[in-house]
Image (tube, helix red, strand yellow):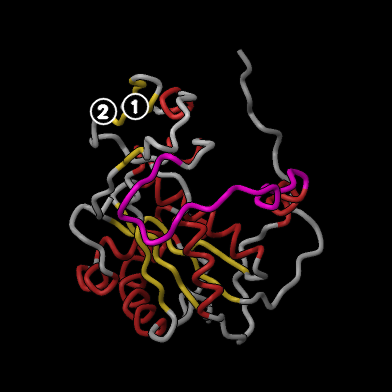
Amino acid sequence: MKREHIVSVNQSLCIGCGLCRDDCPTMTIRMEEDVAVVTTQSCIKCGHCQAICPQGAVSLSGFDEAPELITPAMHVNADALLGQLKARRSVRRFTQREIAPETIRQIIEAGRYTPTGTNKQGVSYTVLMQNIANYEAVGIKLFRGLKRVIDLLYSGFRSIEIDDHFLFKNAKAVIVIKGADVVDGALAASSMELMAQSLGLGVFYSGFFAMITRFSGKLRRRLGIRRGEKAITTLVLGYPAVEYQRTAQRETANVLFD
C-alpha cells in the first residue's frame, strides 16, 4: 500500500467481546483485561478487526473515506448474478454514445474493492478516452510487425485483417489494468467487467494490446507502468451496437470432489 495506516482501538468503546482478535488473520490483536490491544502495526491492514467490531471501537487511519455499514441491499441475488455471467459476451461493436466520467468512476471502484493478495492493493489503472486513437496507432504499428510470428502461434488468426481500429474497435473508453501481481490485476478486471455490464456497457479484453506494451518502452511510460509492473489486461468499453438473444453453450465443468 502507498500510505501508512495505523490500527487503533478506542478502549472506552471496546466491550471485550474478542471478535476482532478471533477474526484477525495475522493474530496481531490480543485481549488484556477484557480490552482489545493491537500488538504491532506490521499486520496487513486488511480491516477485518474494524469490519467485525459491533461497537465501532476499531479504526484505521490514512484512508480518504470512512467505512460503510453493510446493509441487506449490498447483497446480490445469486440467480441474477449467475444469469449475468451466463449472458455476458465479448462486445466488439459499439455505438458512438459517450461514456460519462461517473460511469468510469464506478467501474474503477469495482476494481479498487476487489481483494488483493496480502492486501497489497497494488493494482492501478490508466483510463484512455480523449487520446485513444494515439495509443491505438502506436499499438497497431507494433502489432503489424509482430503478426507474422503471431500467425505461427495462432493458426486461426491468419485470415484476420489488421485495420486501424483492430485493437480498440472504435470504443469510447479503454482501461489498462496495471500491477506487479497478475492474479490481483485479473481479479480486479473481472469485477470491473461485471460492473460495466451492470451499467449497460459492452466490454472485451484486448489481450493483444497488453502484450504489445511489453515491446514498447514508449507505451509503458505513457501508460504510467513502473519498473516491476506490467499491463496485466486491457478493458475496452462502449455501449453495445449489438444485442445478443441467448447464452453461449459451455462444456460441462471438470470437477474433482475428494
Instruction: Tell me: residue 164, above or below residue 189.
Output: below
Which numbered marker is on residue 29?
A: 1
Task: Tell me what residue is drawn at x 36 percent, y 42 percent.
Answer: 119
Kind of element beneath mark 2: loop
Q: Residue 247 has which mark?
A: none
Q: Residue at x 45, y 22 (%)?
A: 22
Q: Position of residue 213 (x, y in %)?
A: 30, 65
Circles 1 and 2: CB atoms closer than 8 Å: yes
What distance separates the C-alpha of mark 1 from that of mark 2?
6 Å
> Residue 222, located in which quarter of the rendered image?
bottom left
**The C terminus sits in image quarter:** top right
Which mark, by number, is residue 39? 2
Q: Position of residue 231 (x, y in %)?
A: 33, 59
Q: Residue at x 53, y 76 (%)?
A: 102
Name the amino acid type tagged 2: Thr
Query: The magenta stretch spans which residues?
Result: 57-79
* Camera-side residue of 174 and 149: 174
Residue 200 in picture, x, y percent from top left = 67, 70
